[in-house]
Each structure stands twice: as structure tokens, then as C-alpha cells.
Image (tube, rainbow, N blue to C red):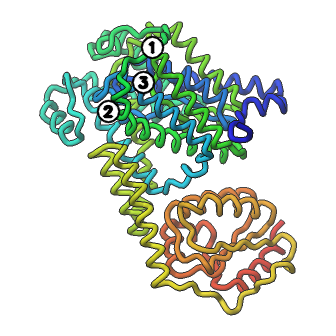
Amino acid sequence: MGKIFEPKFFSLLKSGISKEQLVSDIFAGIVVGIVALPLAIAFGVASGVSPEKGIITAVIAGFLISFLGGSRVQIGGPTGAFIVIVYAIVEKYGIDGLIISTVMSGIILVIFGLLRLGTLLKYFPHPLIVGFTSGIAVVIFSTQIKDALGLNIEKLPSEFFEKWVVYFSNMQESNLFAIAITIATILITLYSKKITTKIPGSFFAIIFVTLFVQVANIEVTTIESFFGEIHSDINFVIPSFDFSNLHMYIAPALTIALLGGVESLLSAVVADGMIGANHRSNTELIAQGIANIVTPFFGGIPATGAIARTATNVKNGGRTPIAGMVHAITLLLIMLVFASYAKLIPMACLAGILIVVSYNMSEWRSFVSILRGSPFDIIVLLSTFLLTVFVDLTAAIEIGVVLSSLLFMKRMADIGITAPIRVDSDVLEDYSNLPDGISVYEISGPLFFASAKQYSEVIKNIGLKNKILIIRMRHVPFVDSTALHNFEETIKTLQNSGVKLLLSGVNSSVLQDLKKYKITSLIGEENILDSFDKALKHAKEVIVTLP
């Protein structure tokens, strides 16, 4: 398969891994394994399957994603984004249906990778991603109210409104102990970082709360009273299905594949920024696909790259896939030795952890900032959000992508009619005589979700080689929120490396968007000039003052 499939692990083995790095990776893997335990259990339970299925997913998929993946530090496993999908599939098609859908999604991901579609999945517009991520967060939060309040409800409706109607009608039966456990879990999870940032609070919360409940003999629902024993064995399972019904699983499989692909690549991009590396997107997709093909046969659920666990890995010194493999082995050992104790965890404690997860997933700051942006981005954001909450994620992704494309085409048509590009008459076109340390890059055309990543990479590469970078924007008719988001991250990266940015020829509508996203204050309004001549003159004045 040539360069399409090149796992980072094998590349690093060829170049060599130092003994110091190996020790650092093993330590990081053990820490991430401990961190992943409560999340794996919580995600399994919230998805409507037994707790051990979450751990099995983190063990098998986590190992395969690190072993075969295209990222140095990606940690794979079950994530909050899949809770809504898995729960819906299990409710409609049962466990066998979930296995078939997950395996099919894995095949789709492998095909995506082989067709080199890794770069295409990065073009999902920012409002669409924020819309369905925020929507998933709201849905996860709403599913945890039953356990958070200790309500004894046998069957919850799947619809959002109906669920809350049932909650309010049963509110008087709330268990005060369960509420206290939920609040204690949330507080420990949030505030333990003041003591240590190495291990997230969810692990401390699950240990302290479970011990307290057992010692004080408090009567609340636990994993054991709800699910029974947590099995510590891993068995090979073959689902029973009819080939004539295979078409039923295409939609859920495609949803798992799209969401898993996007989330894993987003996580890999975030990790790249943290360690200054570049992942191999097509290799990553193929690895995610293989993991989702293999894991269901051993009782697992869908898996993808987990941003929070990947960040924890990086913060603890993990720099090679060995850390991810050690994380999986650590979880396996914990499962084999301590599974019998995990059944004692109160359901209210898991609800508290998932409420914090849903808050962190909500991206409310990004949500609010997009609401301050263009009407086109607002339409995509709210449509995707509302469809995720009130219909389902499949419809949200499908309609969101189509809507983004249609609105972009309309926007381009409107620009062509109403906003002809203005070219400054006093600009300098010859860049050959620029002083040392000053470079120029010109953006031509709209800065939107399809071109944002490419422009950001080029700007970063040019900027890091100079002291001052002038970005000419005379031919930029508009920017969208995805581009603004990427532009902001690029500016911060350059500024952290001591590079000064100047903008020239920014039109009034683009300038307004830059102000809304506070990018003008990030660059400094004195560094945004209306012509290239003025920008170059300013750059010459500034460079003599730089060290």
C-alpha cells in the first residue's frame, strides 16, 4: 500500500527510541491507563451496554490504534461522542446490530484511508463540528439525570422532550444520597486539579466516593445492582444476522465512521500542535478502521481517538505509540485484577463523571463566538445542534454537510455579484528586495473551511523562518468561522515563536469579522494596515527594534 499505510510505531522503531523516552512512555501509558478506567466504564454504561464492554474497547482498540496508527501520541478507546449513537443502535437493533454496524463502520474507515480521504474529513466546517458536539453534550447530560437524582425509572423514553417530562413527573422520588454523591463527584473531579494535574479528578472521585459509600453502607444503585457482576474475561463473539437485512445497518455504520474519522483526526491535529509533529491521516483512518473491525468480535463498542486522554498522554511525557500500547496493557491488568471491585461503583458517581464530560464537550465558548459571527455559520451551527438533540446524529451530520455546501455556494454567488475585488493601486508587486527577516504571503480568494487548513500550514511554515510576516489580504472577499478559528491558532503559534504578524489590504467586512473574533486585538490594531506600502514601511521600522 506504499505511503498510504505507514504506522508511526514502525517508523520510530527504524529510527530508534532512546531508553529515556521508553521509560517516559511507559510511565505516561500507566497514568493514561488509570485515567481511562473510570471513563471506559462510564462510557460503556451510558451507551446502554455492560461496563466491561467499555474497558474491552479501551484495551483492544486502544492497543491497535497505537500499534497501527499514524499519530505518535494518539490514545484510542470509547468516547463520549459515541454514547448517543451506540445507545440508539442497541435500543433499535440489539447487541448483534451494534456489532454488525461497528464492523461495517470499520470497513468504511479503511476504505476512506485507502482512497486517501483523510485530508477531506478535515474540511468539515467548524460550526458543524461545534453544533453536533454541543448537541451530543446536551443529550449525554439529559441521559444522566435519572442516575444523578437516583430516580427508579425502569424504561426511559429515547426522545429528548419525553425524557424530561418523565424526569419532572418523578422528581419527588429523588434519592438525596444519590444527589449528594453526584455533587461530590462533580466537585472532586473539577477541583482535584488544584492538588495534581497528572491524574484527572474522575479517578480520585470514583475511588473516594465508592469507598465512602461502602464504609458508610449507603443504599444507592451501584453497577452491581444494575448490571450484576463485571466479567473479567474476554470472549470471541460472532453475531447472528441475516444478509438480507444488511442494508439496515448502512446508516448507523456510516454515522459511526464519519464521527469516528472526524474525531480521531481532530484529536491527532490537536496532538500535533502539542508536540510539534505531523500525523499521517490516511494511516490513522486505516488503523481506526481495523480497530473497529476487530474490537466488536471481542465484545467491544465503537472506538476513536480520545482528545482528553491523548492530551493527558502528552502532558505526562508520552511521545511514541508505546505509551498508547502500555495504556491498553495497564487497563487489561486492572480489569483482570480489580474487575470484582468495579461493580461497587455507584451509578450516581458515574453520572457525575459524565456530567463533567458533557460540560467539557459542550464547547459553549465556541458556540457563543459562532453566534456572534455570520448568519451562514449561525444557520449551520443551530441546525446541526437542534437536529442532534431532537432528531439524531445521522440526520444532523448529513443535513449539516449539505447545508454548509449550499450556503457556501450561495455566499460565493453573492460575493461575485455584490463585492468585486478591489486591487490597491499603490502596492508593491516585487518581493525580491525585501529586507532580511521580513517575508510576505498573499492570500487570494475566500478564506473558508475548505482552504483554511492549507493556508494555515503555509503561513506557519513561512512565518517560522522570519522575524516579521506580512500577510496580504487584498484579494480575500470573506472569511468564515473555521478559517478564523485556524487563523487564530496559527497566529498564537507564530507569536509564541517570536514572529510578528502584519496584515495589509483587509476589506471592511473581513475586518469586522476579525474584530468579532478578537483577532485584531491578538495581532494589534496598529499592525493592520490598509495598503502594502504602509505595511512594509511599518515592518522596516519594527524590525530594527526586534532582538
What residue is drawn where x is 62% and y is 80%?
474
Name the kind of residue labelled 2 in the image.
Answer: Ala
Question: Which labelled disc corresponds to residue 99?
Answer: 3
Q: Position of residue 100 (x, y in %)?
A: 42, 26
What residue is drawn where x is 63% and y is 87%?
423
Q: Position of residue 173 (x, y in %)?
A: 15, 25
Q: Nearer the viewer, mark 3 or mark 2?
A: 3
Q: Secondary structure at mark 2?
A: helix
* Residue indicated by mark 2: 88
Quadrant, the N terminus: top right
Q: Position of residue 175 (x, y in %)?
A: 22, 23
Name the kind of residue labelled 1 in the image.
Answer: Val
The 10 Å Cα crowd at callout 2, few under 14, some 14 to 19, many 20 or more, is some
Residue 41 shown left or right of residue 435 in the figure: left
Question: Which labelled disc corresponds to residue 189?
Answer: none
Quarter of image, res 32: top right
Q: Secondary structure at mark 1?
A: loop
Q: Earlier in the sequence, mark 3 or mark 1?
A: 3
What residue is drawn where x is 76% and y is 77%?
539
Name the kind of residue labelled 3 in the image.
Answer: Ile
Using the image as rendered, state which of residue 63 and residue 29 is in the foreground.
63
The 10 Å Cα crowd at callout 3, few under 14, some 14 to 19, many 20 or more, is many
Q: Would residue 222 be seen by someone viewing this image from the given angle?
A: yes
* Residue indicated by mark 1: 237
Quarter of image, res 341: top left
Q: Earlier in the sequence, mark 2 or mark 1?
A: 2
Q: CA distance from mark 2 to mark 1?
A: 21 Å
Q: Secondary structure at mark 3?
A: helix
- C-beta proximity under 8 Å, tags 3 and 1: yes
Q: CA distance from mark 3 to mark 1?
A: 9 Å
Q: Nearer the viewer, mark 2 or mark 1?
A: 1
Residue 156 shown left or right of residue 12 in the figure: left
